[in-house]
Amino acid sequence: MERAFRQLLLLPILIQALLLCGCAATAPPPSVPPALFADASFAPPSQAIGTDGLFALSPAMRTYLRSAAFARHLRNRDPKQGLLDALYSKSDLLLEYDARVTRTAAETYAARSGNCLSLVIMTAAFARELGMVVRYQGIQTTDETWTRENGLYVLSTHVNIALGNRNTTNGADPDTMLVVDFLSPPEASRLHAYPLAQRDIEALYLNNRAVETLMGGNVDDAYWWARAAIMAAPGDATAYNTLGVIYQRHGDALLAERALRAALARAPENLPVLQNLGPLLASLGRDAEARAIARRLALLQPVPPFHDFNLGMDALERGDYAAARDLFAREVRRAPYSDEFHFWLAMAYLRLGETRKAQAELALAVQHSVRGDTRERYAAKLATLRRQDAGILRIH
């Protein structure tokens, strides 16, 4: 499943990152709370921060629009479907999904890859250039997909785009809108969609860049990206939560609490915010408040993310491979699109000598991986196992 949004979560030992749409659960306060930012505590940004040029077409993109290859896709076809074929057919651009970085339209086109937010932004840029109506949608998925990187846990959610041919009233017939989605069609059709404004897309982009920059170790630039995301959508809890984690990583516990409280005011049952706030309060010696948050979390989320996975890793380390298999299998049932869970279930099967089951889980890890580098690593391991199973290669 292909996902896109990022929001940070800080636990006592690890920082976790979540890719969330950040929809407010209650009517948000009208503006940014006072004394939220601490600009003087962070170095000036080392790069341009903002959304200028987010949807701009590069010269190469304009050249492609004028090319014979692009015209071939539009010939005798509905323009919406022609654009979709031109961008995502395997004959021309060879675009690939890659969750590692959120890109502008021009960057996505140049790299020929991006996460679903990047692909939505690029698709919107082309569609608007062709005079189409563009509508953005968030998708409420029924599962939670977590990944981990550089001490960060990442929970992913999804966005897509609907295209319409502009009519004489400068609008589009809702019945003729074409949904462009990077989920498989059967799954996408059964999930609830809700409208997003362009401002929401811009705020999600800014927040994603904050998370990605923090994952890369640049706390200062991450601060400026998160600050910009809050200014773009001051009613959305997502970037406040991100800012809270940045403050805590920076050693500013009281500012972190202020940011997390602002997030909680906008989304009182936001699990990442509660999971961040509880340990923060405990670190400040406010144990009673921390316990109250923990009780609230236990009701909202009885089994926290990666609970069984971490127990499975402990079991694997002590050599209890059957227990590890059962625990990893439980995580797979809970999050069937997590490539990491499939990979470690494969490793447990391998330790138990169940090579065919290990191969099946590795194949699922390859299928669900959203990063090119991990996909290649899983594929190489799978190829090795298949050669071993065929008697071509012996591994000691």
Image (cartoon, grey):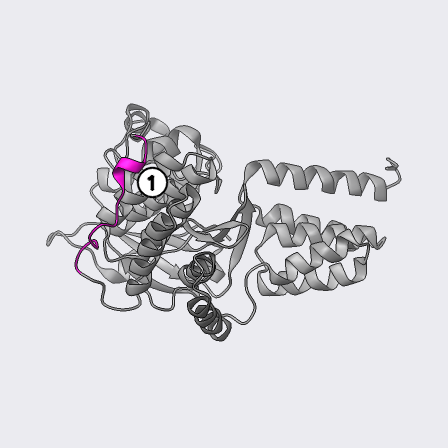
Q: Residue at x 79, y 42 (%)?
A: 386
On screen, residue 385 above or below 57: below
Q: Is residue 348 magenta?
A: no
Which residue is disc 1 drawn over? 223
Q: Residue 220, how many percent across, how many down?
A: 36, 35
116 or 132: nearer the eye? 116
Q: Is residue 36 magenta?
A: yes
For residue 178, say whether it is visible: no
- In the image: residue 215, left or right of residue 341: left
Q: Residue 276, how many percent across, how many down?
A: 44, 57
Q: Quadrant of the C terminus?
A: top right
Q: Residue at x 70, y 63 (%)?
A: 327
Q: Main secondary structure of the magenta part?
A: loop
> What's the magenta region?
30-43
SS at circle 1: helix
Q: Residue 298, how many percent across, how many down?
A: 51, 72
- Which residue ends up furthest to the left in the rendered image? 169
Identity, as a three-letter code, of the amino acid under mark 1: Tyr
Q: Residue at x 28, y 44 (%)?
A: 227
